[in-house]
Image (cartoon, rainbow, N blue to C red):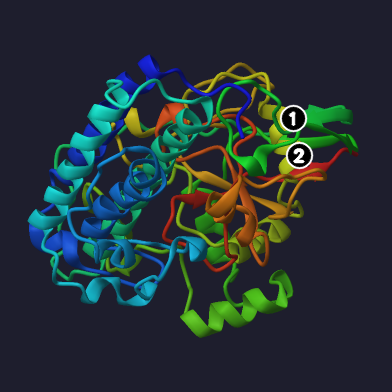
Amino acid sequence: MSTRAATQAELELLYPRIRAATEALCAPLAPEDQVVQSMPDASPTKWHLAHTSWFFETFVLAPHAPGYRALDERYATLFNSYYHAAGERHPRPERGLLSRPTVGEARAYRAHVDGAMRALLAGEHGPLSGELAFVIELGLNHEEQHQELLLTDAKHVLALNPLEPAYRTDLARAPRAAPAAGFAAFDGGLVEIGTDAPGFAFDNERPRHRHWLEPFELARAPVSAGEYLEFMRDGGYERSELWLSDGWDARAKHGWEAPLYWKHGDDGWREVTLGGARAVEESEPVCHVSFYEADAYARWKGARLPLEEEWEHAAAARPIAGNLLERGRLHPAPAARVPEGELAQLFGDVWEWTASPYAPYRGFRPFQGALGEYNGKWMSSRYVLRGGSCVTPERHLRASYRNFFGPEARWQFTGLRLARSAP
């Protein structure tokens, strides 16, 4: 648990703001867009709207709001994601088969939960305990995660459509720029990793602990699309010596020959973006690559992926700022100029794969009760990503934030930054 939950007054302001932000992300989508499930790892927009409401109903209202009545008792099963302790769940791969409840009914469910939450936050049931305030704050962070998932899942849906529809046609594009070249050096030594800050953090970020790092170097910018094209032109997808064994098998199984959403035509490589299909911009960070592709590229360059501890040590003193959701571009942008030796784009643009398996820190304590399933149950067969992406809310990030996906995942805005041991 956080050592300092947000106050009731803070939550009363924050709750409607975050819930409204989710609704705003849905506005460009037609109802037909919001009911499609394009693959088992993705969920329909409608499901995200309902599931984030289910969280507040299940963990806040049902146990803590006397007299609360569910809009429909069946929603408890339909919109449970993976919380075994919270009851039965509708199969994840079959969420797209739920033509009912409709999008309108999902929004009505959302409004029903919001009304009860407003009353709770206004103090109609008395002051919030610190424990309950923490659960609400966790629910808001959970919703911010689903804001990102909503966009990445919607992008996957739209990209499969041969009409190549855009999520929005008014997205601004950043000017071209040369990525920051070279590496920045770090001394290493005994460093502190994780957080003991009094504000909110997920359980997988705690406890703060000491870790020994050998001297290392980090690339000053993420790998660009142009640099990745060089790997492709050099036969990177055909050279088994560059790939981990499981990665080589995944490449063959899925037919990978380029990042996800890249298509080759007579005029070269194009990519599908949330702003529509367009030519690949070589100065932008490459994105939608798997851990296996990132690892193969790093090996091709004679480098490696960073350890998550190296990444966090490098990022710890830097402000959370960059091309994040609030910037409104919804696509990685070329790096802005930074002073020589400084790191560019640590936060935003693309989640950066690390070489670190997703595992608990020594002394890890999961959240209590069913909420303990939030992070701890996934600590197997996944790798840590750091830094956030162009669709991550800014307030959601910290230098200690640990994202995690399986090594074949590509539909998130995932890229890479090279590392190497100091000479």
Say if mark 1 contacts mark 2, CB within 8 Å. yes
Q: How many marks?
A: 2
Q: Which residue is mark 1?
A: 313
As drawn, is 61 to the left or to the right of 316?
A: left
Say if 180 sits above or below 259 in the image: above
Task: Tell me how far mark 1 sits from mark 2, CA to CA.
Answer: 6 Å
- Identify the amino acid type marked 2: Glu
Name the image quarter holding residue 145: top left
Name the image quarter holding residue 241: bottom right
Where residue 291 is drawn, which disc sits there? none
As drawn, is 218 to the left or to the right of 178?
A: right
What x and y, as percent, mark residue 199? 57, 22
Q: Sort mark 2 into few (<14), some (14-19) or many (20+) by Cα contacts within 10 Å.
A: some
Q: Sort mark 1 into few (<14), some (14-19) or many (20+) by Cα contacts within 10 Å.
A: many
What x and y, as percent, mark residue 94? 31, 77
Q: Which residue is mark 2?
A: 309
- Identify the amino acid type marked 1: His
**In the rendered view of the protein, which quadrant contains the N terminus?**
top right
Q: Nearer the viewer, residue 198 or 329?
A: 198
What x and y, as percent, mark residue 172? 24, 33
What x and y, as percent, mark residue 124? 27, 24
